[in-house]
Image (spheres, grey):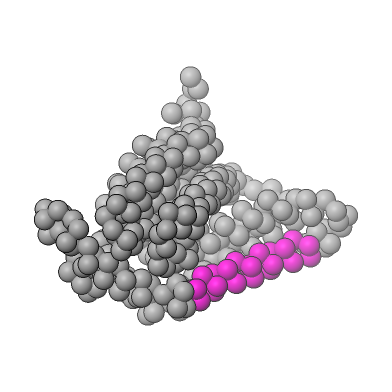
Amino acid sequence: MNKPSQITLPVAASYVLMAVALFVALKSGLLLALFSGLLVHSLVHLVAPTIAKKFSTHQARWIAVALLSGLIVAALSTLIWAMFAFMRSDTGNLSSLLQKLADIIETSRNQTPPWIAEYLPDGVDALRTLLTDWLRAHAGEAKLLGQEAGRIIVHLLLGMIIGSMVALQDATAHVSYLPFAAALHQRIVNLREIFQKVVFAQVRISLINTTFTTLYLVVVLPLAGVHLPFTKSMIAITFIVGLIPVVGNIVSNSVIVIVALSHGLNTAIASLIFMILIHKMEYFLNARIIGAKVNARSWELLSAILVMETLFGLHGVVAAPVFYAYIKKELRDSGWV
């Protein structure tokens, strides 16, 4: 068992400042900017050393990393724009999907037992209310996406620009820090490492889940003579919400099972069984992929998500895996756990 390391005053101050910064990011709506900056910083950090080795002078390395940062920011911005464009298109329109889900639920009332039917939403307005009540209850300050779109885009762009600038400095400059600055820099490096491990691992998990879901929706069901509507939308939703550990899988599964009701209760039950298997597989993947990298089990991540959701709402759900793994790393590096 590791002995607790001695904590100096600068190190203790860096812990306090880091805790305050993370709390402010959660409470003030800066989580998106923080994560977008960490994402760009992680991507540049992965590729920049290889590029920098091919250039002999400091100026050449600076130009190479600057170009890489610009390309990453441009690529991420294009990807985000494409996602928004898809969700607003006829193929991925969420309003149409909500209307279809409401119609399916209404026509499925006669196929379900009375004790289940009485809990089903009555019409599209009730369904929309059901889906948004949870967000409104825990994020009262949030407004409609259309009203917040400008602020979201600004936060994304500023976060990515700041992340690229920090990555540019780290990759091209060798700074000798004083004690407090060195301790604070180490806190930031630890957070970036944990973010990189958790997010990249969760992308792998989401891709695996989306692949199996695509095979089920595009191959298995059509072979059985079942063609579900909004297949492309459901595949896109599976990947996007799958980036949220555990919770995202439940959301996507619920949408698929409801849509499957349009082809009868048997199809819905078969879909539910398949999604349960996928959901159980995600627990295994979390334990093997994320847990192995950050030394956290699935039940730990789920408990962190539950607590953070209660305290901070939707932002807490998104932040929980990264923040919990970061705190555990700091404690582990100090020899406390």
Q: Principal SS element in the magenta part?
A: helix
The front one of 66 and 85 is: 85
Specify start and end residues of the magenta stretch as a single range. 63-86
Residue 88 appears at what percent x and percent y?
A: 45, 77
Q: Is 254 covered by the magenta stretch? A: no
Residue 23 appears at what percent x and percent y?
A: 38, 55
Image quadrant where one finds the C terminus: top left
**Which residue is found at the position 42% from the left and 63% from the top?**
227
Residue 80 appears at what percent x and percent y?
A: 54, 69
Q: Is residue 74 above or below residue 214?
A: below
The front one of 164 and 299 is: 299
Q: Is residue 283 above or below residue 82?
A: above
Q: Image quarter for residue 162?
A: bottom right
Q: Image quarter for residue 140?
A: bottom left
Q: Is 68 covered by the magenta stretch? A: yes
**Which residue is found at the position 30% from the left and 63% from the top?**
262
